Image: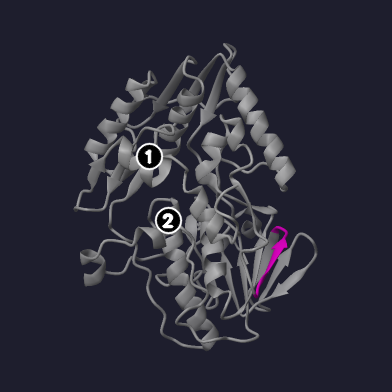
Amino acid sequence: MYTKPEPSYATKRNPPNLDNHVVPLRGRGRGMTAAAGQRVVIIGGGYAGTALARTLDGVADVTLVDRKDVFFHRIASLRAAVEPEWTSRPFIAYDKLLVRGRFVRAAATGIDAERSIVTLDSGQALPYDAAVIATGAEARDPARFTGATLPEAVAAMRGQQQRIAQALSILIVGGGPVGVELAGEIRSAHPRKPVKLIQRQDSLLAGAQNPQLSERALRRLQAQDVTVRLGQRVSPSGGESDRGELILWAVGNRPNTAWLADDHPELLTPAGLVRVDAFLRVDGWSNVFAIGDVNDVPVGKLVLPAVAQAKTAAGNVKAALDGSPSLTAHRPSDQKLLIVPIGPRDGVTMLPLSRQGIIAGSWTTRNLKGGNLLLPRYRKALGQPSRT
């Protein structure tokens, strides 16, 4: 089980480098010595997996495995679900991510730690000197990659657009970042459609633990004529009520660990998360790590913490390949940073400029994230032209 180390003096004093956290790590093993011929298998090509693969590409033989044939920029998916011109933008090809390594489109079916082999649904077996589980978590529609190929995902996204456009009204369940952003995107695209958001807690964005941020998000949604009901629950049901109301769930993400459950149930928490130690190693395995939304590190399951874990894991994987006993404990940042667009031109942001965070509004949110949803940065990080 992950145990958080004591925060270092540097962590307390120095604010995070936002570029290093927001986009996948750009260095290809800078500061690391080569480990020629040593094999690293990374299972999962999301934010954490691609960041790690790119960093280790110059120091080991990296194989990145994912069931999808493109990277899914989930940050842009909510806008793509309502704006036809954004339909294909969340999907970015993997073909230019790695220089030395390779991408394998397949789903992992198991890990044999004794033989150091990852098995795939294609029947292939990938030997490794170090492996990393980065399979993330499965979100609800529309923040979900449906299918396994780009054409399937694009078709599903168009289906989402049609469902939202044709609905008489929209009910969003969940008032975290996804729910708030989704309400804003729907309101921007469909200014006259009734939109309601229900949150079981007594405030929006409750995980940020900042009443000022919560109150500002509430005011911005209400100013856009979104009905917000706090402290209420909705019974699980289908996606559409008998009144023509479309129900969109912005809660209930599930870690993608079912493929581990049969052979290694001891590795998983009751919630299905992979148990890791302070060095992000899977409990009991010396050369297998787990990073991002899939593990039990007690941080918000967001992009920034996932990419921060990839940075720690890069050093620890390299140490494991070198046979070094000196690993670095992962220290989750205590800094407060959260950027929540409410449509392309509005939103709220909490900046890590004080102990509790400094709250900013529409201009800051639009320029940090809301305008282009970080798409140019992620395209560049995956080796693609910044413009689609």
**Residue matched to label 1:** 366
Q: Is residue 296 above or below residue 138?
A: below
In this view of the protein, can residue 8 be seen by the observer? no
Q: Earlier in the sequence, mark 2 or mark 1?
A: 2
Q: Is residue 343 above or below residue 257?
A: above
Labelled disc at residue 160: none
Q: Is residue 153 left or right of residue 368?
A: right
Q: Residue furthest top?
A: 243
Labelled disc at residue 22: 2
Alpha carbon of mark 2 to alpha carbon of mark 1: how far? 15 Å
Q: Which residues are magenta?
A: 100-107
Q: Is residue 386 left or right of residue 94?
A: left
Q: Residues within 10 Å of mark 2 (few under 14, many from 20)?
A: some
Q: Residues within 10 Å of mark 1 (few under 14, many from 20)?
A: many
Q: Position of residue 184 (x, y in %)?
A: 43, 29
Q: Amino acid at mark 1?
A: Arg
Q: Amino acid at mark 2?
A: Val
Q: Position of residue 198 (x, y in %)?
A: 41, 25
Q: Is residue 250 left or right of residue 17?
A: right
In this view of the protein, can residue 87 be seen by the observer? yes
Instruction: State which quarter of the image contains the N terminus.
Output: bottom left
The secondary element bearing badge 2 is classed as helix
- The front one of 83 and 12 is 83
Q: Is residue 145 above or below residue 10?
A: above
- Residue 47 colored in magenta in the image: no
The secondary element bearing badge 1 is classed as helix
